Image (cartoon, coloured by chain):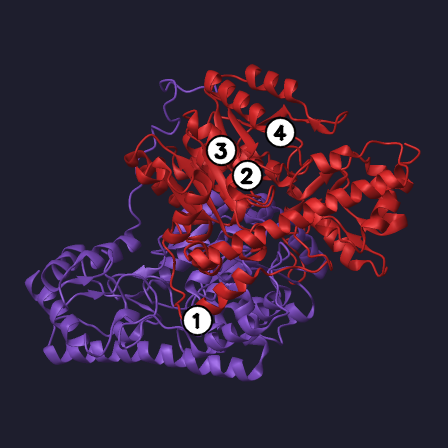
Amino acid sequence: MASMAAISRGLLKRRGIVRSPAAVAGLGARSMASWFGHVEPAAKDPILGVTEAFLADPSPDKVNVGVGAYRDDNGKPVVLECVREAERRIAGHLNMEYLPMGGSINMIAESLKLAYGEDSEFIKDKKIAAVQALSGTGACRLFADFQKRFLPDSQIYIPIPTWSNHHNIWRDACVPQRTFRYYHPETRGLDFASLMDDIKNAPNGSFFLLHACAHNPTGVDPSEEQWREISHQFKVKNHFPFFDMAYQGFASGDPEKDAKAIRIFLEDGHLIGCAQSYAKNMGLYGQRVGCLSILCEDELQAVAVKSQLQQIARPMYSNPPVHGALIVSTILGDPELKSLWLREVKGMADRIIGMRKALRDNLEKLGSPLSWEHVTNQIGMFCYSGMTPEQVDRLTNEFHIYMTRNGRISMAGVTTGNVGYLANAIHEVTKSA
Amino acid sequence: MASEDHSHGGSVFANVTQATEDPILGVTVAYNKDPSPMKLNLGVGAYRTEEGNPLVLNVVRRAEQLLVNDPSRVKEYLPITGLADFNKLSAKLIFGSDSPAIQENRVATVQCLSGTGSLRVGGEFLARHYHERTIYIPQPTWGNHTKVFTLAGLSVKTYRYYDPATRGLNLEGLLADLSAAPSGAIVLLHACAHNPTGVDPTLEQWEQIRLLMRSKGLLPFFDSAYQGFASGNLDADAQSVRMFVADGSECLTAQSYAKNMGLYGERVGALSIVCGSADVAVRVESQLKLVIRPMYSNPPIHGASIVATILKDREMYHEWTIELKAMADRIINMREQLFDALRAKGTPGDWSHIIKQIGMFTFTGLTSEQVTFMTTEYHIYMTSDGRISMAGLSSQKVPHLADAIHAAVTQH
């Protein structure tokens, strides 16, 4: 491994950071002179900037279908009952000592059961290196940094399109990015043929980022058959599959079903990596709870890999936050609470599936000339409407409807109260398309 | 060259070797394995009561209950920069509520993951936007500092700090080394209760350091992990930071609530950048978001909510200051007891540094051989540099520790 100094120099060079000499000017002056006068205002985050704009809008009709946070049918954020109960049990009883660098052992154990299966032989044989991470973002970042450190010549193949922050994560980890085709704009479904081509044409042993279920932003998932073909081709090409699973349970309502893609790959003998998040499926958004796991050949390797993942976490935040992890392990470790959770997750998924149907029905009733099948074909929190940025701008400016400019609608923000208004507005801006 | 030479189906990470154990955490691992009833853990820096138990402050428990019983509370994502109230209150805590920098809106504050996270985000920001890429850290310093700044993209140099001969500050060496630093270089300063030595500059010495740094245009980056924990007084422990901010210049500050509010595992902290103007502060904050978003998107809500609840309520704030002073006083008391015990035994050497040093740690001056001896013969665990965590000591155990030091010093 390179020396610390070399790592530091290399990091900046690879990030392509250009320093402005302007900072040097005028530093002889005291007081209000600034070393940071040259700093440019950063562009707003495309997703989080939407909610900011929404909050600033005074219109009573405004609708937020931007950020992917679940809302109930009254448009209110939800704290799950199982979470409230878990918090009641935790408050006042436990201390707040540092977790180990790798995080909560219990939370990790429960997370692995969810992703790999209750009776997974890999868990029994201790072949999985796993650490608690700062939700899905943190899990992806730990993996990206780990990938850079131990396979410095590797790249990451990212689907088109993907969650915008994926690009930021691998860029800041200094891992070069390639893309593979995924979404088919004409069908608003999966471009399976192109996807398979890109898998075949990538150099052997390439790293691929796959959304395990409920693809963000398109809501388009491969079918089980298609996953099997993808897995087979990955074996042929010896590619590394890294799964970002941010919506387990949230897609179909059944966590086991939503983990199908991962289980297929495991059956086929792939040594996968997996990022899990409890932001959506347990509504723990702001708690930042997640898990990064890497399946290894044996226990020894798993121990080594875990120790190295910890070495990446230590200079970033030392050890992960305890509260959210306690909530997760309290719920998943108690059969009654876990049962309650499963019912609540299904409830959330069912409401979204219901809203998809309602939105499509409304658009069809309005006599839209376009096909809206994709609204019910797609799965998970998001609907990739197919609207253009210009049409989205009209929705915002004329109708006070907020979404990201790629036409992604967060179905979680749709309610029986606003679905009619939303359908109307969408019809207005698309009817002459 | 994306493909690897591993056999088909083997792991791409087969070449990954086991990382060496963290020296500080390794001490606790060894301690836990020891079956001796006499054992004493003076390793990791987490506060312990007289009974040797972790402590959750009463005021923290109260804040927790308020939060859990409030049905209107939700778990939504915080903004990238964290909880706004928390940020404002944290800035006031370290800079003083009457600080001109705050009143002039020149401070950009973002919630981060405790001290570590604040240092890392600050370091990354500097590596991207500051013209000087070198940071000077004191010798010795907290073991994680070098890695944090290196991975942030800075190159790390050291300046002399601790004088083993006096077990105090090597001011001459410090000033000489900072004088030799390139203009504009970043300098890491422990705001109070230096870790691991417990040696802090006096106010007069801080003034000398400040003048030198200003004359060379060096950029201060304060690590404030023990505000209130060192002397027992929050304002006194922030004097060094406030002196620097008072002359109108820029600096960075990393704050942690791990020790002073006992929120260790909740990972609560804040990074503040004091800028030359309000306009610069706005732009700086926007760039900090770009560092944070690809790291973890936004910070955890729970710990920051507890802190904000306490800091914004006058009565709870007051209760906190009392509990904080009690922790600091217990540690000061342990220092006095240990010093008295060694003096009573006539242990050779000058042990006054035990009561002169401040904060959680004492740099005993024991050699690594002496430390090993104390572990093997007396089951006393500390890091091999001779650093002991006073927080791990109790009145009951002082005689045992004094015996061990005495034996180590006279037999080695």
Identity, as a three-letter code, of the amino acid under mark 2? Asp
Which residue is label 1 attached to?
A: B260
Q: From the viewer's perspective, is the residue at label 3 or at label 1 nearer?
A: 3
Instruction: Check the residue under mark 1 and report the chain it is in.
Output: B
The Cα atoms of the two marked residues, 1 and 4, are separated by 46 Å
Subunit ID for the residue under disc 2: A
Give, as a three-letter code, the residue at label 1.
Asn
> Quadrant location of the C terminus of chain A?
top right
Numbered disc 1: secondary structure = loop
Amino acid at pointer 3: Ile
- Splitting the image into 4 quarters, where does residue A293 fall? top left
Residue behind mark 2:
A258
State the separation of the CA atoms marked 2 and 1: 44 Å
Seen from the viewer's position, the closer of residues A323 and A138 is A323
Tell me which numbered mark, 2 or 4, is placed earlier along the sequence: 4
Q: Residue at x 42, y 59 (%)?
A: B175
Of labels 3 and 4, the one closer to you: 3
In the rendered image, which residue does mark 4 sit on? A159
Q: Please state the horizontal and vertical placement of residue A195, each as a whole percent of the image.
A: 62, 21
Q: Residues within 10 Å of mark 4 (few under 14, many from 20)?
A: many
Local secondary structure at mark 4:
strand
Name which of mark 3 and mark 4 comes first in the sequence: 4
Which residue is more in the foreground, A375 or B322? A375
Labelled disc at residue A262: 3
State the CA–CA distance, disc 2 to disc 4: 19 Å
